[in-house]
């Protein structure tokens, strides 16, 4: 089932960000921006997970690390060598090198270090997914994405636009399923195959 690919998606997760400072004075924030095969609740009865294949081929793109999805608050960028992203069996891991001359970045580093900020999120487009109706619940598995950014965030939450798009997608699927059932019943009543 295809999603509305015109709406950029945002997903969030609690993480275990770590800070480290090297003797050279370089400071880093690292952690998982996405965890594979974890169920994210979209709304009661609807979940979504990210598959191990979701980021295959996506990490070579130009990706930024932001603060709270704010495009003006760039912490790092993979093309600049200040953001490293990779996947392992757990999920999408990243490490960003903090610019000591950027007060916003240093402030965030200190907040992560104290444990005041420990959440993350990522922004992407869905390129491939699978839908599953489990009876009392529905579930989407995101198989492939185009990744734009990862963010260290104060309050992780699903973007209302993303949830609204998922709900509309689900309602359209239910409508098509009901229409198909109706059509089959009419044929059956008429004795058609």
Image: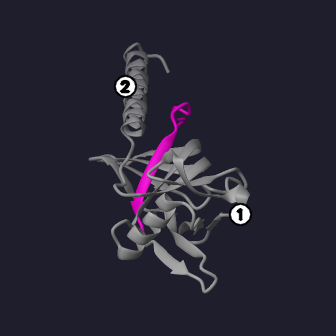
For residue 24, the mark is none
Q: Residue furthest bottom?
A: 23
Compared to residue 164, the image places residue 13 above or below, namely below
Is 91 magenta? The answer is no
Q: Position of residue 14 (x, y in %)?
A: 38, 64
Compared to residue 153, the image places residue 132 above or below, namely above
- Please indicate, yes or no, whether residue 36 appears anywhere in the rendered image: no
Residue drawn at (37%, 16%) of the image? 189
Left or right: 171, with 152 as reference point: left
Classify mark 2: residues with Cα within 10 Å, few (<14), some (14-19) or many (20+): few
- Please indicate, yes or no, whether residue 5 appears anywhere in the rendered image: yes
- Between disc 1 and disc 2, the foreground one is 1
Q: Whole-Å distance between the Cαs marked 1 and 2?
A: 51 Å
Q: Which residue is mark 1?
A: 81
SS for callout 1:
loop
Is 11 magenta? The answer is yes
Q: Position of residue 169 (x, y in %)?
A: 43, 32
Q: How many marks?
A: 2
State which quadrant residue 85 falls in.
Answer: bottom right
Residue drawn at (54%, 60%) of the image? 102
Segment colored magenta: 1-15
Looking at this view, is 2 or 85 the one in front?
85
Q: Which residue is mark 2?
A: 178
Left or right: 157, with 126 as reference point: left
């Amino acid at each position: 089932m295809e999603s509305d690919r015109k709406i950029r998606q945002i997903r969030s997760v609690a993480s275990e960000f770590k800070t480290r400072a090297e003797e050279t004075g370089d400071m880093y924030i690292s952690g998982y921006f996405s965890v594979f095969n974890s169920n994210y609740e979209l709304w009661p009865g609807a979940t979504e997970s990210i598959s191990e294949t979701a980021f295959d081929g996506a990490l070579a793109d130009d990706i930024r690390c932001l603060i709270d999805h704010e495009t003006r608050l760039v912490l790092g960028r993979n093309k600049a060598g200040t953001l490293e992203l990779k996947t392992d069996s757990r999920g999408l891991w990243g490490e960003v090198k903090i610019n000591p001359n950027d007060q916003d970045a240093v402030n965030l580093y200190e907040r992560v270090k104290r444990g005041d900020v420990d959440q993350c999120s990522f922004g992407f487009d869905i390129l491939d997914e699978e839908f599953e109706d489990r009876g009392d619940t529905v579930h989407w598995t995101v198989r492939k994405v185009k990744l734009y950014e990862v963010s260290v965030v104060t309050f992780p939450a699903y973007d209302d636009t993303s949830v609204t798009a998922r709900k509309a997608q689900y309602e359209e699927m239910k409508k098509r399923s009901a229409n198909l059932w109706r059509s089959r019943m009419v044929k059956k009543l008429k004795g058609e195959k």
